[in-house]
Amino acid sequence: MAPEVMHFARRAGTTNISNPKGQHMGRVEGKVAFITGAARGQGRSHAVRLAEEGADIIAVDLCHDVASLKYPLSTPEDFTETVSQVQHHGRRIVATQADVRDVSQLRAALDAGLAEFGRLDVVVANAGIAGLRGEPQIDAWRDVINTNLIGVLNTIDVTLPHLDAGASIIATGSMAALMDVPKKDNPGKNLGGSAYMHSKRAVARYVHDLALELAPSDIRVNAVHPNNCDTHMLHNEPTYQSFRPDLPNPTRADAEPSFMVMQAMPIPYIQPEDVSEMVVFLASDAARYVTGMQMRVDGGGYLKWYDYHV
Ligand SMILES: NC(=O)c1ccc[n+]([C@@H]2O[C@H](COP(=O)([O-])OP(=O)(O)OC[C@H]3O[C@@H](n4cnc5c(N)ncnc54)[C@H](O)[C@@H]3O)[C@@H](O)[C@H]2O)c1
């Protein structure tokens, strides 16, 4: 299936919305960023924040559901909203409906963007799914691994040949990547959930190893690890059930107080914009010697987990 390509290229001037007189340079002014999972949630926030700081955007999202998952993914309307928010900041965007599990779709999406912008500086491998309570279990395992791990490898695979010195690759992990929880509860009964931890751990290690390999080429590779984040991946029935197993049909209001357990700071979750601030920093030249890092944006969640378990 040929991916649907939506061209929303609007020529931008040298200014952005925060520098109407052209005096202020954005933190990623003139760069081009390739972002997966950009139709909503953190991916949209990264696209909009990078655009606000002067980048043009090549955006990818699936924009349809995955059958094994118990919550909906994005829609084409979500993607259109990302496009208009990026354009609001005077930047250009090429948005393509494509599946990170399919290298040929990803390559076509990237090529559409390169044809428009002619360069690539930043890669944000952000698309991901949560397989909690997914059915059939074996499909949930495969879908999560193929999206969260293989999808990240595919994203880096298609973009690497286009990156030069100074480029920045950012992969989205999760606090789940850092919590080395022994699997003793119901092995074989939560394959989608287990696949999530496995995929994120593998991404973290991949970032570590690739960063060393690419350092001599002056290309940086880092991971961002959000904790609970205020997006559709958190706000859905299977997640509410995992936080409130004592209730048959927990609502958001039922789950909300339990979300607090994941952070050391007194918050139920972080916002997508909190992760975007880290992404903008890692994408920018201010981070020119920052590579191989596992950057937690977690309200102290890892510290709390470590203190309790280690
Ligand atoms: N929300 C959280 O609590 C949380 C915590 C830690 C890490 N994360 C990670 O953050 C990243 C972003 O998730 P989010 O919180 O914005 O959730 P989200 O569900 O709102 O966004 C994920 C986006 O990825 C897209 N996507 C899914 N499969 C895809 C595929 N095969 N190809 C292309 N696009 C695909 C979805 O359509 C959606 O737009 C994910 O990697 C996730 O694992 C989220």
Image: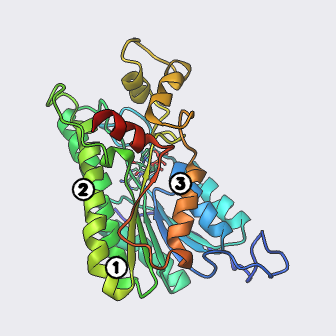
Q: Position of residue 192 (x, y in %)?
A: 26, 37
Residue 129 shows up from this direction: yes
Residue at far right of view:
21
Tell me the SS state at disc 1: helix
Amino acid type shown at disc 3: Val
Colouring scheme applied when the structure was drawn? rainbow
Task: Please name the residue shown 27% across and 39% down the image.
Answer: 310
Query: Dot 1 surroundings within 10 Å: few (below 14), some, or many (20 or more)?
Result: some
Amino acid type shown at disc 2: Ala
Determine the CA span between mark 3 and mark 1. 23 Å
Q: Earlier in the sequence, mark 2 or mark 3?
A: 2
**Residue identified by numbered label 2:** 202
- Return the residue nearer the eye: 286 or 84: 286
Determine the CA span between mark 2 and mark 3. 20 Å
Of marks 2 and 1, the one in the foreground: 2
Which quadrant of the figure contains the N terminus?
Answer: bottom left
Q: Position of residue 70 (x, y in %)?
A: 37, 32
Query: Dot 2 surroundings within 10 Å: few (below 14), some, or many (20 or more)?
Result: some
Query: Dot 3 surroundings within 10 Å: few (below 14), some, or many (20 or more)?
Result: many
Q: Which mark is residue 160?
A: 1
**Residue identified by numbered label 3:** 275
Amino acid type shown at disc 1: Leu
Tell me the SS state at disc 3: helix
Q: Position of residue 254 (x, y in %)?
A: 51, 18
Of marks 3 and 1, the one in the foreground: 3
Task: Please name the residue shown 60% across and 52% down the image.
Answer: 273
Quadrant position of residue 29: bottom right
Q: Earlier in the sequence, mark 2 or mark 1?
A: 1
Is residue 76 placed above or below 283 in the rendered structure? Answer: above
Q: Position of residue 93 (x, y in %)?
A: 59, 70
